[in-house]
Amino acid sequence: MEHNQSIELKTVTTFGEFLELQHDWNSLLEQSGNDKVFLTHEWFTAWWQAFGDDKELFIILAVGRDGIHGIAPLMRCKNSFRGIPARGIEFLANNDSPGCGFILKKNHEYLAGTIISFLLNDAKGWDVTLFKNMIHDKAVNSIMVKVLEEAGKKYIINHGLNSPYIVINTDWDTYFKGLSSKSRKTIRNVCNRIKRLGEDRKSTRLNSSHTDISRMPSSA
């Protein structure tokens, strides 16, 4: 891990400032170990436009002499803790988000601890933080826990989203033929329904555009 470079933490609190980060944001994401579509600048832009009305951006940038090394995509929002109203800091995410987390340049996992220390010591106006459905590995999580324990802060760790999967050791056709006739029928029915739904949506969208294209939403 690289610790010898001076890192400055900056906060972004306006949507205009956030929009200016698009190139640097996505460039850092490509250099991280979590290059996922739901961590892209475009994803957060769309999310904020849909869900950000009653919230305040609180994005933390970890900046070195050669650019941004870490991003914490956070916001301030109204929250509650065990039924008690509280001022919260959370990821830019909700139940429509597959996951979220810090965007860190490879070999810069220690910045997760730097960001947590900043929240504990310098960020004002919050009562509880909620990092829901974090996608990071054990190294990042252990660094965060260590900072919290050294600061004597209480924390709770709960299981997040769990996406079950089946390991297939053969090609799909071989696996499919080995299933029961009932399972094969169920899968065919589901696939056919998805196909029909896709065709119906495409047809509806095309019909709408021919009827009154001026009423199509700008994001379509």
Image (spheres, rainbow, N blue to C red):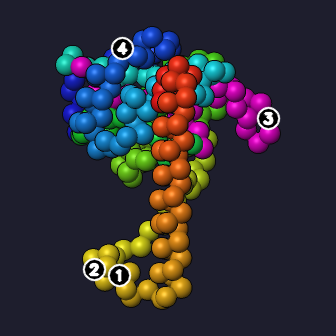
Q: Quadrant of residue 93?
A: top right
Gap in Å between the C-alphas at discs 1 and 4? 48 Å
How busy is the neighbourhood of tag 3: few (under 14 within 10 Å), some, or many (20 plus)?
Answer: few
Please name the residue that numbered disc 3 is placed on.
84
Please name the residue that numbered disc 2 is placed on.
170
Gap in Å between the C-alphas at discs 1 and 2? 6 Å
How busy is the neighbourhood of tag 4: few (under 14 within 10 Å), some, or many (20 plus)?
Answer: few
Look at the numbered discs 2 and 4 and tell me whether their residues touch, using CB distance below 8 Å: no
Gap in Å between the C-alphas at discs 3 and 1? 51 Å
Q: Is residue 174 above or below residue 161?
A: below
First reached walking from the N terminus: tag 1 or tag 4: 4
Identify residue type, mark 2: Thr
Q: How many marks?
A: 4
Q: Is residue 123 above or below residue 110?
A: above
Please name the residue that numbered disc 4 is placed on.
20
| Magenta stretch in the rendered image | 67-95
Left or right of residue 34: residue 195: right
Look at the numbered discs 3 and 2 and tell me whether their residues touch, using CB distance below 8 Å: no
The image position of residue 75, as x and y in percent, is 55, 25
Please name the residue that numbered disc 1 is placed on.
175
Look at the numbered discs 1 and 2 and tell me whether their residues touch, using CB distance below 8 Å: yes
The image position of residue 172, as x and y in percent, is 32, 75
Taking the spot 36% from the left edge, 14% from the top edge, the residue there is 20
Identify residue type, mark 4: Glu
The image position of residue 15, as x and y in percent, is 49, 14
Identify residue type, mark 1: Tyr
- In this rendered view, identify the residue nearer to me: 192 or 118: 192
3 vs 1, front mark: 1
First reached walking from the N terminus: tag 3 or tag 1: 3
